[in-house]
Image: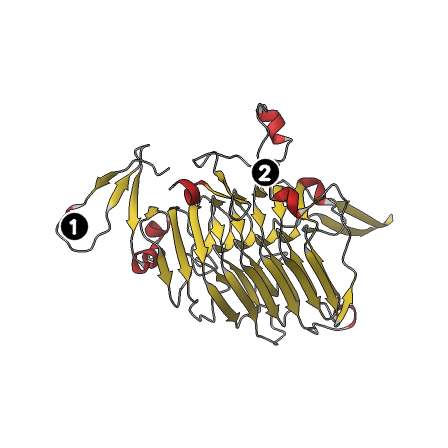
């Protein structure tokens, strides 16, 4: 249900000179109302506006959109709060900027930034001219918190750049296209959100990661390796890295179609040739050691990866970093009827198999009882049991939709 708000009108508003109204929530916090696309775009105007507290009042359509908070070396991400208030933002197209590598409603949601109760829609086809592209319906990169959001966007994206010059990107996600229904890359938290529609990436760089929720989740670990030469001979030291789990996708699901395709790119020589890596995943294409995917469900209609060169991996679950085995940080269920296809050099490969413990039938997932937490569980038991919290607020944000046979967010059902 909507929070009770007290309208606070500034003198400028009362005089009719265009200042935005503010609302005061039930907990006493002032929020600035966003009624137009121009007002939404103004969030990028300054560090102050990027850290404000906002509530969306209308559905909006955005043409030639410049993402809020680019957040690269020349800009700052959004570190405020945007409450979508159950409204839909439809992205009709992104502006063409050769310097922008982070594309979405937000370029970057910074640490401390919150986006909630929002639906993003649209049919977008975007081609970047850089060697790196992070793109998502809500954010190119998320370091903050995305909660109770829905992405119904049809997203097509890629890179057209055959040079061997490497633009500096984020370590572990370099030289390629990384896209998802919610975020291109998640370095924060995405909770109680879902994605439908489609994510389709195509490029001619060395990596393409497409995911129903995020292209990639978390990052790798850093250790050290040293060689010493002395009077006693040669010594070798290895210090293993550590990974603190802090990048989370929890209680999310996706029914999107996910496609990723890349042509072979020759980089360097010898062993470095033909290093194309293409991954598609129902929730995320790749889950690094700092990432956890918990209590989430992949029901994507089709998941497909097509690569020339080294590898193409298409999977309902995220792939883990080599040698890490961090599926232990993941609890992902998937529909047994998903069409999963992998192609390497034009030849279809047999996709990986999953255990019956992870797979569920479509008929099971069409039952409300399968998604709900059983009654009477303690907090400890709930933490160890799969289930979505059903109710009518942000703490219990899910409601059952008999028409789609899927959970929807409380604001879609009760507002």
Of residues 338 and 87, the one nearer the viewer is 338
Mark 2 burial class by Cα count in 10 Å: few <14, some 14-19, many 20+: many
Q: Residue 401: percent from the left, percent from the top?
A: 50, 44
What is the C-alpha distance between the residues marked 2 and 1? 49 Å
Q: Is residue 388 above or below residue 334?
A: above
Residue in the picture at 71% in, 51% down? 321
Drawn side of residue 400 relative to residue 228, left or right: left
Q: Which circle's residue, 2 or 1, is located before the other in the chain?
A: 1
Of residues 367 and 7, the one nearer the viewer is 367
Residue in the picture at 74% in, 64% down? 311
Look at mark 1 in the image and give the residue it sits on.
12
Q: Residue furthest right?
A: 232
Q: Nearer the viewer, mark 2 or mark 1?
A: 2
Residue 393, picture quadrant? top left
Q: Residue furthest left?
A: 15
Drawn side of residue 327 relative to residue 9, left or right: right
Are the residues flagged by discs 2 and 1 in contact, CB closer than 8 Å?
Answer: no
| Mark identifier at residue 371 | 2
Of residues 335 and 263, the one nearer the viewer is 335
**Quarter in which the C terminus is drawn:** top left
Does residue 272 show up? yes
Residue in the picture at 52% in, 60% down? 135
Mark 1 burial class by Cα count in 10 Å: few <14, some 14-19, many 20+: few
Does residue 289 show up? no
Q: Secondary structure at mark 1?
A: helix
Q: Residue 371: percent from the left, percent from the top?
A: 59, 38
């Amino acid at each position: 249900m909507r929070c009770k708000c007290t309208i606070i009108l500034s003198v400028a508003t009362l005089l009719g000179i265009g200042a935005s109204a503010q609302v005061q929530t039930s907990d006493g916090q002032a929020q600035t109302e966003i009624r137009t696309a121009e007002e939404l775009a103004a969030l990028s105007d300054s560090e102050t506006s990027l850290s404000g507290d906002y509530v969306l009042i209308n559905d909006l359509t955005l043409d030639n959109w410049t993402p809020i908070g680019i957040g690269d070396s020349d800009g700052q991400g959004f570190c405020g709060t945007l409450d979508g208030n159950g409204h839909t933002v439809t992205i009709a197209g992104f502006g063409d900027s050769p310097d922008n590598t982070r594309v979405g409603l937000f370029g970057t949601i910074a640490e401390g930034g919150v986006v909630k109760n929002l639906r993003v829609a649209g049919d977008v086809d975007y081609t970047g001219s850089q060697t790196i592209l992070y793109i998502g319906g809500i954010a190119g990169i998320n370091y903050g918190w995305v909660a109770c959001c829905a992405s119904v966007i049809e997203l097509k994206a890629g890179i057209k750049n055959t040079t061997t010059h490497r633009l500096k990107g984020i370590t572990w996600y370099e030289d390629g296209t990384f896209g998802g229904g919610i975020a291109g890359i998640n370095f924060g938290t995405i909770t109680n959100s879902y994605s439908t529609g489609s994510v389709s990436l195509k490029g001619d760089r060395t990596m393409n990661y497409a995911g129903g929720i995020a292209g990639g989740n978390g990052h790798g670990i850093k250790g050290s390796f040293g060689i010493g030469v002395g009077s006693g001979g040669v010594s070798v030291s290895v210090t293993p890295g550590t990974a603190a789990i802090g990048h989370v996708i929890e209680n999310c699901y996706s029914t999107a179609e996910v496609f990723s395709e890349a042509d072979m790119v020759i980089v360097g020589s010898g062993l470095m040739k033909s290093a194309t890596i293409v991954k598609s995943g129902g929730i995320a294409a790749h889950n690094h050691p700092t990432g956890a995917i918990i209590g989430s469900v992949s029901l994507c209609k089709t998941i497909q990866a097509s690569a020339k060169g080294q590898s193409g991996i298409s999977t309902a679950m995220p792939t883990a970093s080599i040698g890490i085995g961090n599926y232990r940080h993941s609890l992902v269920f998937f529909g047994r009827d998903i069409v999963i296809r992998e192609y390497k050099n034009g030849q279809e490969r047999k996709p990986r198999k999953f255990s019956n413990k992870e797979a569920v039938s479509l008929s099971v997932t069409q039952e409300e009882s399968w998604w709900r937490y059983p009654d009477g569980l303690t907090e400890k038991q709930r933490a160890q049991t799969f289930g979505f919290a059903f109710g009518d607020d942000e703490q219990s944000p899910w409601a059952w939709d008999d028409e789609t046979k899927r959970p929807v967010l409380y604001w879609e059902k009760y507002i």
